[in-house]
Image (spheres, coloured by chain):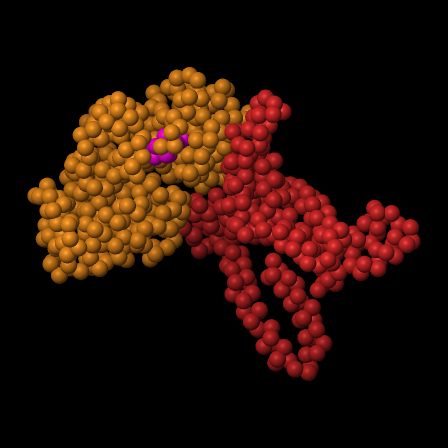
Chain colours: A orange, B red
Amino acid sequence: MTKKTILDRRGLLKGAAAVAGVAAGSGAVTGFPMIWAQNIKNVTLRQFGTGVSNLNDIATRCKADTGITISMTAMDTDAAAIRAITQPNSYDVADIEYFTVKKVFPTGRLQPLDIKKIKYYDEIVPLFKDGKVTPTASVGQGTAPCKVSYVEGANSTKFAPSPTEWMTLIPTIYNADTLGIRPDLVGKPIRHWKELVDPSFKGKAAIINIPGIGIMDAAMTIESLGLWKYGDKGNMTKPEIDKTIKFLIEQKKAGQFRAFWKSFEESVDLMASGEVVIQSMWSPAVTAVRSKGIPCVFQPLEEGYRGWGGGLGIAKHLKGLERDAAYEYINWYLSGWTGAYLNRQGYYSAVLTTAKKYMSANEWGYWMEGKPATAPIMSPQGQQIAKAGDVRDGGSYYDRIGHIACWNSVMDNDRYLIQKWNEFSVA
Amino acid sequence: MSTTVDTAAARPAAGATRTRAEGRPLGAWLLALPLALVLGVFLVIPIIMLIVVSFLDYNSVQILWSFVLSNYQEALGSAVTWETFAVTIKYAAITWAITLFLGFWLSYFLAFEVRGTTWQMGLFLVCSIPFLTSNIIRTISWIPALGRNGIVNSVLLHFHIIHQPLTFLLYSQFAIILAFVHLNTLFMVTPIFNSMMRIDRTLIEAARDNGAGFWQTIWNVVLPLSKTGIGIGTIFVITLVMGDFVSVSIMGGGQSASVGIMIQNEMSQLQYPAAAANAVILLAIVLIMVFLILRVVDIRKEL
């Protein structure tokens, strides 16, 4: 049935008149009353979120496929959390990260999502349900998505420890982050997080300047150096925060760091200009450096990755036709085209089975299975990012997602962490 | 710029109203009303809100409506706050000294060396050309010039003046001060130029006739008569640098702090009351600075 719908869409997309037909057709599939489904094409949904997935290409394609207009606002992670909490009436759909959910959901700004209305619910990867990529994989420290994926009921703001029928977000995107390096400039193989503070990279290293994420990269480095072990890197005690910040200040005073970056573009510039040869990085930033013709590797490290995930939530105020449109949009989001688009940027989509249908065998092999590319690999914007024979950094989906040591987090000692991070900034 | 001048101008106007108040009080009140409304809505009310919020409690997601002093206790009791203010004041002081030096001599050149008002005004407008783009763009455009592989290092390496790229050029205090000087010199030039243009040229001739040398004339005639311009320029530069967070974070590469960055960090973590408390402290310190400047220089004299 799923497959048939997609075939219908492809066939029908040829004419403008077909748009209404698609909406009506998919409406019939999900059981919406016809009259609403026809009206859906006039609905505009206001969505905000981080730059990683608030892309105009997605909105344009959504308009063509479903008729729903998505008006997108892209902002940084912190600004998105602020918007979600302080301006709940300024958006209909929130595209936010799971560690943000830990802050946002208890405030009642979002409504739980009914999994019965999610067409591809059964095919969403288990990472967001019980947290295990494979039956043997561990969940990882920090705010793992599965810990904040479900609430107890339709009007609840209390997180449920195991799957229920009500989700906080419908997952769309996730990845395993690690250090980015310039293989031409580091001059030796990089296999551990501790290389970030290696004296040979003095003045040529950088970390991310978002307290909750930066301190986690520092913690990975400290454990890699063997200085001490954390109880939970994603939820440090005050003495652990003190020790970690002290370590960072020592490194800063010794001149280890060239810069601390806050935005995607800054990290790309630091790496592309050669100011920095090893730093915290995001996957598409590595892709962006490479598409300039500059070698850059998203280096897998033995201690594992720092994971993050995001998804779509619905504002509390949304009801009736608009809410149905939001569900329709989410179902469209998971139906494959967007998943393939995100996979091609080096992220992962929450429903892999549908995304696979929109990717070539070569693309699927390169991005998901860790196989050598059989032909050049292109970014969604059409720039070549890998040539035939290249293998993705870190290998297959299971090799990368299965080795997440820690998830992006909001700590219980959040307020204390910010104070200490300011201390680090001034030092 | 114009708002400060307006506010300063409003004060003598209010004084004048008082003396003439018996004559036509209603008209005077009506004339003052628009400015009072604008200042009330956009200045007084927000500041009152800021002060109120600075006394409220908060948790990790929202402001709690209970009166506490902890925001101030935490801010003032922490060495970090003091260090941050010290760093910010240091940036302001260094920037002030350099912009004052540049501003004074640029203005002197424009006012006394360039002949003819057309040329003077023409050259003055040339000074303002960089201001046709935004602050942030002007700051960011330094990065390709100063980087490890930037223009400056490439040129110096090419001519074998240096053998290793100079890394202190970017993401350093040097870079921060450079950006501040670049951004703020015009705010010093404008008022000083304005003051100097009002200096009666016969005074300079009189000084010369009485045997004063160049430096004596500068020190005893030009400098005292430019004092109001220097005062206004100082207020602009100090307030702009004290409140900055963009230039420091771009040019410092995130490695340096300022009060503005501290406040921004707190806001980005939804700690509005803590941010408000720091903003109130910053406001108090800047107001004290402006007060001290006004004690030294009588700005009203010029207006």
The answer to whether residue B299 of the structure is visible from this angle is yes
Going by the picture, which residue comes out furthest to the bottom?
Answer: B23
Which contiguous range is marked in magenta? A280-290
Quarter location, residue A296: top left
Residue A286 lies in the magenta stretch: yes
Predominant SS of the magenta segment = helix
Q: Residue at x 61, y 58 (%)?
A: B1
User: Which percent across, then down, holds residue B37?
Assistant: 54, 69
Q: Residue at x 58, y 29 (%)?
A: B155
User: Which percent across, then down, holds residue A121?
Assistant: 16, 42
Looking at the rendering, in which quadrant would you find the C terminus of chain A?
top right
Residue A92 lies in the magenta stretch: no
Nearest the viewer among B161 and A169 is B161
Going by the picture, which residue comes out furthest to the right?
Answer: B210
Q: Is residue A24 above or below residue B180?
A: below
Nearest the viewer among B260 and A340 is A340
Quarter location, residue A223: top left
